[in-house]
Amino acid sequence: MHPLFNAPCMLSGALALFCSLAAQAETPPGGNVDSLLAVARENNPDYLRARREADAARERVLPAGNLPDPRLRVELMDITRDGEQNPTVSPSRAGAARYTLMQEIPWFGKRDLRSEIARLEAEGSVGRADGTWSEVASKIKILHAQRHFLTHSRDLTREMLELMRRLEKLALNRYRGGLAALQDVIRAQAEQSSLRSELIAMDNELRQSSFRTNALLGRPADAPLAAPVAWRALPVSEKLDYALLENRARAINPLLAAEDLRLKAAEKNRQLTEKNRFPDFTLGVAPNQQQNRLRQWDVMVEVNIPLQQSSRRSQEREAAAMLLATRAGSDAASSRLLAELAENLSALAAARDAERLTADSLLPQAEMTFEAALVGYENGKVDFATLLDAQRQIRQARQNRFKWRAEMETRLAEIERIVGDDW
C-alpha cells in the first residue's frame, strides 16, 4: 500500500500521542513523593534563597584573596608660580606636579588566609543550602504520608458509613418483625452521624495538609494535588543499622559538613588575627612633572605601625573564644542529630512491629469477631451493642494499620534528613 494511504492512521496515532502527553503534562503532582520533590526543588522559596546565598558566598572568594585597588594621588605645587599668574589646576602651568601611585600589600600570608576563609564560608553556604533542602524534603515526605493516611482513613470511614447503612436496614427489618428494639435503629443512625462528623474533620485536615504541601512547593495554596497512590518502599532491616547510618551521617550530612567548615574557617580566622601583629605595607612610585616633562622619579614605602597591642591581644582572645564556641556548637549539632537518629530508628522499628502485629493478628481477629457478631445478631443471639462494638474494632484495626504505615514513612523521612541522603 502506498504510504499516503496510511496518512489517516498516522494522524490518529499522532493525535493519540499528543493527547497522552497533554494529559501527563496536566497531571498535578502528589501521586508519589518524587513528583512533589521535583516541583519543590525548582520552586521552594527557602531552598531558592539558600542557593542564591551560596552563589553570593562563592563570589566573595576571588575578591578576598586579591590585593586592594591601587590609589593615585595628584599634587600640584606652586599653582600661582610665585604670584605671577592666577591659580590654576593645569599640571603644565603649575610650578610642579607629582603623581603618586600607591599599592597596599598585606603582610605575608594574610591574603591566602582571607581567601581560604572565604572559600570555607562559601562551601559552608553550599552545605547549609543542602541542609535546607533536606529539611524541606523531609517536611514534604511527612506531609505526603499524612495525606496518604488521611486519604485511606477517609475511604475507610466512607466504607464504614455504608456498612452502618446496611446495619441500620438490618436493625429496622428486625424491629419491624418484633425481633429487635427501636434503640438498635437509633444507635445505627447515631453511629452514622458520628461517622459523617469524622468525614468533615478528615476533609478539613486533608485540605490543610494540601495547603501546607503547596506552600513547600511554591504553588498557590489551592493548587490541585493528585491523591497519593502508593506507600513508599521501606529499606530492608540491614540498612537500618545504627552504626552504619551514624557513619553515613557523619560523612555526608550537609549540616554537619557545614559545621565542620565553620570550624575550619574559625581556625583560619584565628591565624589571620595573629598575623595582625605584623604591619602591612604600601609601596608607591611618584613621577614629578615640571611644565610638560617628567624630570624626577621618587619611590616610597609606607608601613603601618601596630602599636595598639592591647587591642590586638583582645581581638586574638575573641578569635580563640569564637573557635572554642564553634567547636562546641559543632559537637552539639553532631550529638543532637545522632540522638535524633537513634530515636527515629527505634520509633521506626516499633511502628514496623506494630503494623505487622495489626496486619497478622489484630485485623484478622477483628474481622472474625465482626462476622460472628453479625451472624449472632441476625439469629438473635447477640445484641446490637455487641455488633456495633465489633464494627468499631475492625475499623480501629484497619485505621491503626494505616497509622503505623504513615508513622514508618514519617520516621523514614526524619532518618533521611539526618543521614542527608535518600535510599
Image: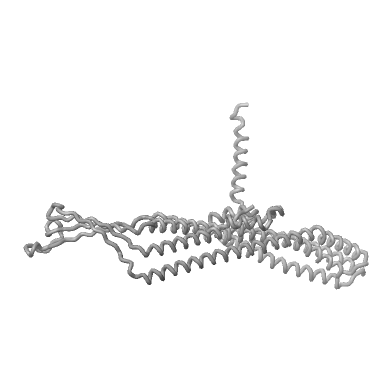
Q: Quadrant of residue 133?
A: bottom right
Q: Residue at x 85, y 61 (%)?
A: 365
> From the image, which quarter does the N terminus lie in?
top right
Whole-percent x, y for residue 249 in the image: 60, 57
Q: Residue at x 59, y 43 (%)?
A: 18
> Horizontal placement of 170 versus 418: left or right?
right
Whole-percent x, y for residue 334 in the image: 59, 63
Identify the colour scheme used: one colour
Q: Relative to the observer, which residue lies in front, 375 or 51?
A: 51
> Horizontal placement of 64 versus 335: left or right?
left
> Horizontal placement of 175 versus 212: left or right?
right
**Image: 369 above or below 181:** above
Q: Quadrant of residue 304?
A: bottom left
Q: Quadrant of residue 212?
A: bottom right
Whole-percent x, y for residue 231 in the image: 69, 55
Whole-percent x, y for residue 220 in the image: 56, 60
